[in-house]
Image (spheres, rainbow, N blue to C red):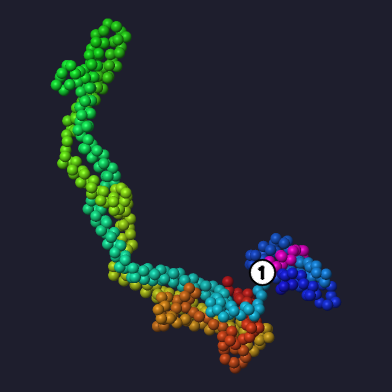
């Protein structure tokens, strides 16, 4: 592989030869990155869908790269090899030491046979965990939530007792201004009424605007001059308007009586509203918004025993469903384990490990004490993880009669690398989508 993708090294050329060649045929269908590289390079693709990659290294240090009969930069072959070639060495044995990696191997091998029940398991598990979390939170925070609920209820009781109306504080402020200034308003309205209608006792020395306009209208109406008579209708309109204004001012003055009792009542109402605005919001509209929000929050803060019991019932129902899906996943893995073991063993025979055999075990992981994700299956408490309840382990029998042991204990570093290679070959040829 270094000769395909790395720097040109003259040491790779056999003594006495002028060049060294590395050539390989690759099938890349379905590998998006590889398809893009082949297309962009303009490589010729064979009828079977494969393409030939070639690297030539000369003794003088020059090198050439070809892909599908086309000359390409060496970097193109490097990119292609990243997409299509898996390299295994002794360091890769670390992957086989991780239980999650071993479980991933069997899941990749089985494809949709495991993926379908696993998706169903994961969907129910997400809902199950959400219910558990909510039940735990409500149980542990019940006292705190109850205190919060009491505060919200107290606030709503206080607000409902006052029963403020939208914008009421603004209206009361205007009403108080009028009631407090009644003397000033009466004086202004009375003087305006006298100016329009004249003295209320008929004193001729204090004529009003209406009387003066009426006198002017009388004089113009009796004039013999046509121009003056044409002004009369306009004065008549002004006389009617002044009479209306005078009447309204008179009514206003009559209704504008001082009412200390009403002022005291309005001030008391304003004081009630101010107690609410000091505690809950800047104005009455804000207080009403706080009350609406408090009612919504109370609906989600049900800490009663009934609510907790309902959540517990839902948790148990989901646990039954989850256990059924987990059993389906385990059964699918059990079936695939035997097939996978046989395939890997077959590949090892071609890798100088003809007497070796692989076994794949699938066992449900017991739940530890205090496990919050414990699930009961067939009377046993198991750990319900994100990928199911199973622990998968690859065992190796080094030769006939040898006991099966975990691969990292039964094989050397080189043998582990060959096991990894055998696994990659089996997964590459798996027919399951």
> Which residue corresponds to the image point at 27% horizontal and 44% vertical from the top-left?
169
> Which residue corresponds to the image point at 31% horizontal and 51% vertical from the top-left?
281
Q: Is residue 7 above or below residue 194?
A: below
From the viewer's side, name the closer residue of 166 and 284: 284
Span shown in magenta: 67-81
Quadrant of the rendered image containing residue 31: bottom right
The residue most toward the right is 16
In the picture provided, is 108 more to the left or to the right than 197?
right
Image quadrant holding the N terminus, namely bottom right
Quadrant of the rendered image containing residue 172: top left
From the viewer's side, name the closer residue of 238 and 191: 191
The residue most toward the top is 224
Considering the numbered disc 1 on the image, is that residue within a helix, a strand or a loop? helix
> Which residue corresponds to the image point at 82% horizontal and 72% vertical from the top-left?
59
Q: Which residue is mark 1?
A: 82
Residue 88 magenta-highlighted: no
Tell me residue 427's x, y (percent): 61, 76
Residue 73 magenta-highlighted: yes
In the picture provided, is 379 more to the left or to the right than 84?
left
Image quadrant holding the C terminus, namely bottom right
Q: Is residue 265 above or below residue 193?
A: below
Q: Is residue 409 above or below residue 298?
A: below
Would residue 422 be visible to someone looking at this image? no
Tell me residue 323's x, y (percent): 43, 77
From the viewer's side, name the closer residue of 46 and 270: 270
Tell me residue 196's x, y (percent): 23, 22
> Which residue corresponds to the image point at 30% horizontal and 57% vertical from the top-left?
295
């Amino acid at each position: 592989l270094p000769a395909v993708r790395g720097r040109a090294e003259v040491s790779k050329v056999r003594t006495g030869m002028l060049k060294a060649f590395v050539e390989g045929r690759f099938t890349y269908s379905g590998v998006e990155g590889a398809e893009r590289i082949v297309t962009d390079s303009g490589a010729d693709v064979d009828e079977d869908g494969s393409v030939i990659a070639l690297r030539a290294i000369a003794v003088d240090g020059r090198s050439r790269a070809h892909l599908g009969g086309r000359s390409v930069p060496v970097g193109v072959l490097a990119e292609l090899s990243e997409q299509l070639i898996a390299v295994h060495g002794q360091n890769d044995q670390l992957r086989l030491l991780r239980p999650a990696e071993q479980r991933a191997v069997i899941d990749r091998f089985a494809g949709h046979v495991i993926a379908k029940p696993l998706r169903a398991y994961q969907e129910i598990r997400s809902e199950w965990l959400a219910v558990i979390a909510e039940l735990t939170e409500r149980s542990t925070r019940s006292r705190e939530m109850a205190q919060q609920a009491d505060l919200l209820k107290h606030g709503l009781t206080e607000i409902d007792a006052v029963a403020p109306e939208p914008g009421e504080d603004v209206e009361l402020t205007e009403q108080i201004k009028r009631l407090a200034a009644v003397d000033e308003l009466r004086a202004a309205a009375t003087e305006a009424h006298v100016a329009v209608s004249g003295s209320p006792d008929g004193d001729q020395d204090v004529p009003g605007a209406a009387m003066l306009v009426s006198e002017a209208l009388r004089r113009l109406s009796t004039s013999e001059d046509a121009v003056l008579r044409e002004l009369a209708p306009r004065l008549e309109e002004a006389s009617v308007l002044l009479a209306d204004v005078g009447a309204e001012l008179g009514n206003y003055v009559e209704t504008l009586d001082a009412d200390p009792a009403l002022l005291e009542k309005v001030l008391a109402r304003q004081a009630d509203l101010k107690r609410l605005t000091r505690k809950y919001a800047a104005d009455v509209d804000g207080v009403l918004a706080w009350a609406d929000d408090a009612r919504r929050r109370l609906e989600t803060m049900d800490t009663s025993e009934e609510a907790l019991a309902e959540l517990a019932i839902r948790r148990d129902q989901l646990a039954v469903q989850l256990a059924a899906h987990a059993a389906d996943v385990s059964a699918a893995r059990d079936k695939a384990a035997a097939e996978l073991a046989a395939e890997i063993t077959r590949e090892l025979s071609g890798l100088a490990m003809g007497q070796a055999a692989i076994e794949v075990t699938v066992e449900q992981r017991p739940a530890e004490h205090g496990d919050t994700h414990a699930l009961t299956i067939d009377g046993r408490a198991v750990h319900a993880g994100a990928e199911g309840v199973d622990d998968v382990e690859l065992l190796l029998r080094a030769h006939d009669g040898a006991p099966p042991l975990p691969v990292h204990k039964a094989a050397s570093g080189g043998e582990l690398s060959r096991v990894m290679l055998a696994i990659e070959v089996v997964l590459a040829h798996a027919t399951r989508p």
